[in-house]
Amino acid sequence: MATSLEVRGVSLRFGGVRALTDVSFAIREGELFSIIGPNGAGKTSIVNCISGRYKPTEGQLFYKDRDITGLTPNARASLGIGRTFQNLALFHHMSVLDNIMVGRHHLLKNNFLTGSLYWLTGARKEELEHRRKVEEIIDFLDLQSVRKATAGTLSYGLRKRVELARAMALEPRLILLDEPMAGMNFEEKEDMARYIVDLNEEFGMTVVMIEHDMGVVMDISHRVMVLDFGKKIADGDPATVLADPHVKRAYLGEEDEVLVDPDDAPAAQESAA
Amino acid sequence: MAGPALIPAGDFRTTYAADTTIFPTTTSRNFAIAGVALLCLAPQFFSGYWLSILIQIGIFSIAALGLNILVGFTGQISIGHAAFFLLGAFTSAYISNSAPIPVFFAIPLAGLVTALVGLVFGIPAARLKGLYLVIATLAAQYILLDFFSRAEWFSGGSVPASAEPFSIFGYTLRGDRQYFYVVLAYVLASYILVTNLMRTRDGRALVAIRDHYLSAEIMGINLTKYRTLSFGLAAFFAGIAGALYAHYQLVVSQEGFGIERSILFLAMIIIGGTGSIMGTLMGTAFVVLLPESMEWISLHLKGGAIDKALSLNTNITFLREIAIGVIIIAFLMFEPDGLAHRWRQIKAYWKLYPFSH
């Protein structure tokens, strides 16, 4: 399969702090790729480098063989890179519908002049066509009942879902999900996992996911990369990565047999629930 | 408009078009049309004094609308709005005096010139936030005012510049009664345009920047472009309003358009409701009517029991100034979301009566 994203020797420093050191990996198109690692390992930093919020101190990023290292975040969105945030970053005073419509910014053509003249310039027609697309996303994520609600008034789980909807509205080919299940209960996690698999399989998006829930990561990812102290320590299919002694030491803990075996992980959760 | 509206039971929308109308219900639309129709009749019934108040509300509400785009919708701030208002006034007077262009065209031209100048000031301002932006716009205010006092060819320097009465193709409108319709047309056009702007792509981009600029950028919105654009739009409406004011007063002077006027514009949108289009109109009406009503109250207090008890005598005029200050502070404390919010609550009360929720 063709390469979607290639990260070549990316380092990121903030003064004396080394957030990332010489990280390289490639993500194939259509892959569900997870990044795991302990807190402060640089997982969000690498996603920020890909989405353009940080500019790497060294190294390059290629998206579909195009160097995107110097591009602004908004230019990357137009190329088809979407993302969600770890800490909710919705537009709190806008309705859910408007939040998702913002995601279609780069697909809409009307501007402040044609938009102001609404009826005369076809802006109305265009808005309505895109409203239709947004409603499809609302259907997919089951947000019908809250589409007119102000985003800031929603519960945590719903907000996470609206954020996913907003990122989907961009029609990205590569979607970056920063801890999509953090702080969710078991049922919400299950729903979210299904949505993510659907994004990957039905919508054909390449998914990069940061997640701490090892059960979910092992179940749905095609490939896993492990970061520790800003360095890549392992990368490969879930089972191989889990068996890696470095990974055990850095992240999973050596004694914890339950987490190490991928088949046991869901069972452990069920008994906990 | 913004915020969940109370839709009567049984009012189902079956098309997306029906769900994107300006007015939430047919009744509210009919009320708005009736309101405009009543305003069209206003010159027949109102005296010159009340008509001049209405014209002032109209003109200032256009400027305040521009400021609300910048402050209420984009989350930037400006305390240089009065300078752009004045720039529009001088430009329109200058264009119609020095070129054979009728005032009808001079007003939108002045708006465009002011928008260009606004864009120039917007370029550095788009990179600033919060208090730093306040100081940058303060600089804009002083730079423009200084320009007006030095450029005698443009503004007449210390002598107020004269402006032609409103004319179109040789026909001249004279007096408040006729000018009222010009202002009404501009108010309607401005409010409709901005309402449309806010329900389309670029308006949403502005609000997205206000609410969370980092994720707005990730959603593909160019922050610098839209912040600058917002400055340009704010300046455009200030310029239009200033031009309307120039041809209303028939004379333009710097007097009364210092920083205090800029702050008064801010007061209008804060009292009306930042980020609310109808609130802008309410806030402007409030700020224009407040000194008038205070004047009236103090006039009636004169010689009354309170006056005698406190022996106010000539100091009674200061009561007015104090009261304005007190009312604005009270507004900020008890109604921070502005009149627009209060209006929504009143509407909700009637719709839900006799229940409270």
Image: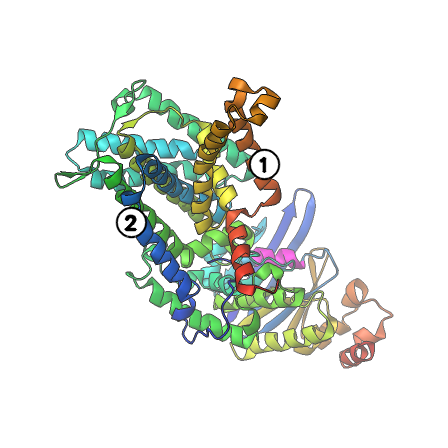
Q: Quadrant of residue A150?
A: bottom right
Q: Earlier in the sequence, mark 1 or mark 2?
A: 2
Does residue B253 appear left or right of residue B327 in this picture?
left
Subunit bearing disc 1:
B
Q: Assign a secondary structure to mark 1.
A: helix
Judging by the rendered image, the residue that carries numbered circle 2 is: B40
Q: Assign a secondary structure to mark 2.
A: helix
Total marks shown come to: 2
Name the quarter where the C terminus of chain B is drawn. Answer: bottom right
Task: Locate residue A112, reporting x and y percent.
Answer: 36, 53
How far apart are the two marked residues, 1 and 2, measured between alpha carbons?
A: 35 Å
Other-residue count near label 1 (Cα within 10 Å), few / some / many at <14 / 14–19 / ≥20: some
The answer to whether residue B328 is seen in the rendering is: yes
Q: Quadrant of residue B113?
A: top left
Task: Locate residue A43, reporting x and y percent.
Answer: 66, 59
Q: Is residue A182 magenta?
A: no
Subunit bearing disc 2:
B
Judging by the rendered image, the residue that carries numbered circle 1 is: B329
Does residue B152 appear left or right of residue A250 in this picture?
left
Q: Mark on residue B53?
A: none
Say which amino acid is labelled 2: Cys
Residue drawn at the location 85% of the way across and 68% of the way down? A254
Q: Nearer the viewer, mark 1 or mark 2?
A: 2
Q: Nearer the viewer, residue B346 or A92?
A: B346
Task: Locate residue B1, reporting x and y percent.
Answer: 46, 58
